[in-house]
Amino acid sequence: MPAVRSQVLEVVRDAYPETFEGLKPSKPLGESVFSGPTPHPNQVLNLFVQQNLTSALPMAYYMATRRGPRSLMDRHLPRNAALSPEILQSAITGLMALREMELNETHDLIFESNGAHPCPASNCPSRSPTGPAASAAYRKVFNCTVGSSQLGTKVLQVPEFYEDSGGELQCVGPGICSGCVGRWESGHAELRKKTWAALPGVFGLKS
Ligand SMILES: [Zn+2]
């Protein structure tokens, strides 16, 4: 049994890594690592709390909260997916902090990262970052990045800055050049790294 336990723990550690550097893009993340019917993230969170799997808790909290309050408090879930008031409090507090971080930092990244350095590309709206074309494009990109996470958060998800437009990849913000998108991509990678490091504090897991 100890061998089985340590193998299981290894799989769990890969799917719920403790550090940003521990993320392995080729491995399944979160509850998709479990075989059979995928458990609800609340069930995984409860299990990890019971088992005292401290290193996996920040990610387990994130996976449960990213779906928003309705999922956290869903009354139609099996009993082992119901969260205790203590866990629920940490989850909701953490969700609010993550959402605020996501909105503020994404806003600064998209609307202000070009402010000091207008884009040199001749067709890019960021040539005049405060002009109406740039503002309209930035707003579209911002809404795409944070928009559909109205109730939860997707701050740790890699955003899609491009969309397929008649077989060609184009930025979701009309006319934005690849140089500007590249700046946003690396800025968002920094945000994900920073957010990851903040998870234990955000969910009250640090004493
Ligand atoms: Zn540009």
Image (tube, rainbow, N blue to C red):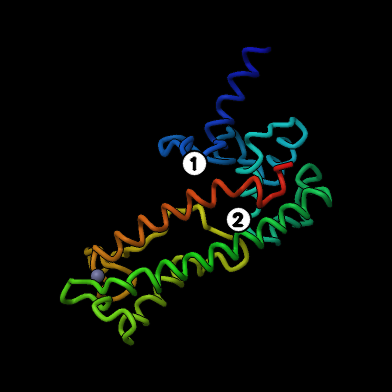
Quadrant of the image containing the N terminus: top right
The answer to whether the beta carbon of the residue marked 2 is less than 8 Å from any atom of ligand 1 is no
Q: Secondary structure at mark 2?
A: loop
In the displayed structure, would residue 151 be above or below residue 19? below
Tell me the residue that label 1 is attached to. 20
In the displayed structure, would residue 41 be above or below residue 191? above
For this rendering, which residue is in front, 134 or 119? 119
Q: Earlier in the sequence, mark 2 or mark 1?
A: 1
Q: Is residue 119 left or right of residue 68?
A: left
Q: Residue at x 72, y 58 (%)?
A: 92
The type of residue carrying mark 1 is: Phe
Residue lying at the far left of the rendered structure: 122
Percent of width and height locating residue 147: 51, 70
Residue lying at the far front of the rendered structure: 116
Quadrant where ligand 1 appears: bottom left
Q: Residues within 10 Å of mark 1 (few under 14, many from 20)?
A: few
Percent of width and height locating residue 158: 43, 54
Q: Residues within 10 Å of mark 2 (few under 14, many from 20)?
A: many
Q: Is residue 127 left or right of residue 14?
A: left
For this rendering, which residue is in front, 201 or 65? 201
The type of residue carrying mark 2 is: Arg
Q: Is residue 81 left or right of residue 143?
A: right
Percent of width and height locating residue 61: 66, 47
Q: CA distance from mark 2 to mark 1?
A: 17 Å
Corner quadrant of residue 130: bottom left
Q: Are marks 2 and 1 in contact (CB under 8 Å)?
A: no
Q: Which mark is residue 66?
A: 2
Residue lying at the far bottom of the rendered structure: 132
Q: Residue at x 71, y 35 (%)?
A: 48
Residue lying at the far right of the rendered structure: 85
Q: Residue at x 75, y 40 (%)?
A: 46
